[in-house]
Image (cartoon, coloured by chain):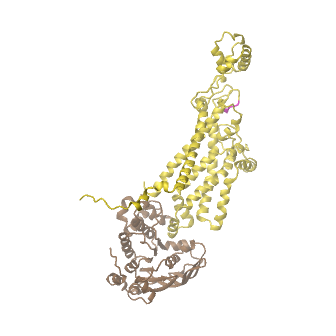
Chain colours: A yellow, B brown
Amino acid sequence: MALVTPTVRRPDRWATLHRSARARPVEWLVERGILLVSLSAILLVFLIFLFVAREALPVALGRMTSARGQRPLPVDSLDQIPRESLRAYLGLKADEFVAMTREQLQLLMEIKAEELAGVSEDKDAAVNTTQWRYLIGPHQWSDYDQPEFIWQPVSRVPKYNLVPLVIGSLKTTLVALLFAVPLALGAALYVSQLAAPQVKEYLKPVIEMLSGIPSVVLGFFGLIVMASALQFVFGYQYRLNAFVAGLALGLAVIPVVFSIAEDALTSVPRSYVQAALALGSSRWQAAWRIVLPAAAPGVFAAVVLGFGRAIGETMVVLMASGNASIVSWNLFESTRTMTATIAAELAETVVGGHHYRMLFLIGAMLFIVTFVANLIGDVVIHRLKTKLEGKA
Amino acid sequence: MPAPMDPLVKLDSRITVGSTEDHASHAPLIEVKDLSLWYGTANALDHITVLIRERVVTAFIGPSGCGKSTFLRCLNRMNDLIDHVRIAGSVHIASQDIYSHEVDVIELRKRIGMVFQKSNPFPKSIYDNIAYGLRIQGVRDRAALDEAVEKSLRDAALWEEVKDRLHSSAMGLSGGQQQRLCIARAIAIRPEIILMDEPASALDPLATARIEDLILELKKEFTIVIVTHNMQQAARISDFTAFFYLGKLVEYDTTARMFTNPARKQTEDYITGRFG
């Protein structure tokens, strides 16, 4: 039997069904506005990365050179040299070169010859230290006994090995996380599950207030108070080191991890706790064996965020780490992180020079490290969630 | 699925059989005397006196907010967890005052299982859910755990449905299965008493019937106290029924008498559906 098409219609009442978007123009406008703002935030992050990456690209692609292996040309040979190679030798742009008088060119050649005089004898000067093999691998410089990883950007021969800085960042981050994560998670578990409401009322805002302390104040505290106190307690040789910096850094990480973890733990349904208690668990057993695993995705997210904060934090490590760019896994030796290096050196570099670009390369690396950490974090969180929800 | 419109009709067919048993063979287990409870200043329970016998099903009925769930939670001291609760009167279980200062609440709750209105399995595997209660008591022996898990699941009539996926998440079970899992979890630690707070109110009729069959099976071994909204349910499964109204215990008798010949007008009005 064929479908009966309705013949009687009442368009007067049903016609209004179709004007949804235009019917509420203010809502529509606000919605679009919010969308635009959030998209622009994403765009901004992308543009920042683009800027950093663009500045770092010549170094990353090996298009820079710090080598100064040229021999000085005799000043009186000015007229014999082809014009183009003379221009390259003096490092001038085409229009600048054309505008020069002969006397000026002669003067520039004299300066250049003077500049190259000592260098030409040095075999290190011939090395392009911006190449990746020098950035990552050890190299035996002429005045060293063995191949070493050296970050020494302001030297006769700039040395740009990144390994000491990466190790420095990892060391301080590791100390910070080892110190902050157990404390922050313990505090979060206590505040969300065990504390009496009156205690919770005070504890939570106080711990979260830690995040409001400017990092320069934390660095100051680490530099002046903690460094001396810890040296007195542990009796190590170098007052400012990765250990002190890590602990001071931990103070910055604690509120971040605490805040997120506490939210995650609090959002675990009360019914789980009730079921656990009704089975004869102590409150601690319920918190540790039921609530913490149930909040695992959120807790993991908190740790990832803590990692991001630790590796990206600058002021604390700049002040409390001692800033010696040495390769050592000893926590009680001074160390220098990637972030502190950028902060300390960028202002003194020549814009567009290899030192400048090298610092941008470090910045881009930090960018990528945090991005990858967040990506991995997201994947793990997703897996944990599916496992908890039984969709696996 | 039996769904009689009139509870009185239901009665003579099925319930009377269970209720004509000689209840004298079931010794009193829980004695509640003059129990009153306040949430802040609001009086939720008003001088409740009840005697609950062992290995029978005792049902608490009454309209929402009448205090029946609150009363149930007094029996395993779950109300301790709520702030600003004040309790007066006494609850003795097997002649011991459970509100005495010497009583270890954790030990008490190991002896009194509880099943909640909304099924609340832990976000863990089926096996880990059942084994949890034993594990926190320190049982580590794999064979003992395996055995307890199987027995509890069999007792809860869930074994056949889940035996092939014991190690997948309990969150993947249906609502009815989750509730039976919660019952299995509660009986895994072999309590004496099982408290059930509207265990079937969120379930469909088929799942409800399974839970009810299960309760009738479990009462051979456990003392069951159940709160229910559903009067037919109380009539079907319980031996004793107590009717709560506005925090007071209006009437308490064998289920057979409550549903056929209630002493109070209020009870009769409620069970015949005139209010509530």
The answer, for residue B16, to whether it is visible in the render is yes
User: With respect to residue A162, does A391 lie above or below?
Assistant: below
The outermost residue toward the top is: A80
Residue A232 in the image, given as x and y percentages of width and height: 75, 49
User: Residue, x 40% and y 69% (percent of image)?
Assistant: B203
Instruction: Specify the quadrant of the image occupied by residue B237.
Output: bottom left
The outermost residue toward the front is: A12
Q: How many marks?
A: 0
Q: Is residue A73 magenta?
A: no
Residue B45 in the image, given as x and y percentages of width and height: 54, 81
- Magenta stretch, main secondary structure, is loop
Instruction: Specify the quadrant of the image occupied by residue A129.
Output: top right
User: With respect to residue B56, does B121 lie above or below?
Assistant: above
The outermost residue toward the left is: A1
Q: Give the residues in magenta.
A: A149-154
In this image, A88 relative to B98: left or right?
A: right
User: With respect to residue B88, does A136 lie above or below?
Assistant: above
User: With respect to residue A174, does A357 lie above or below?
Assistant: above
Residue A233 in the image, given as x and y percentages of width and height: 73, 51
Residue B250 in the image, given as x and y percentages of width and height: 48, 86
Quadrant where the C terminus of chain A sits is bottom left
The answer, for residue B29, to whether it is visible in the render is no
Q: Is residue A151 magenta?
A: yes
Quadrant where the N terminus of chain A sits is bottom left
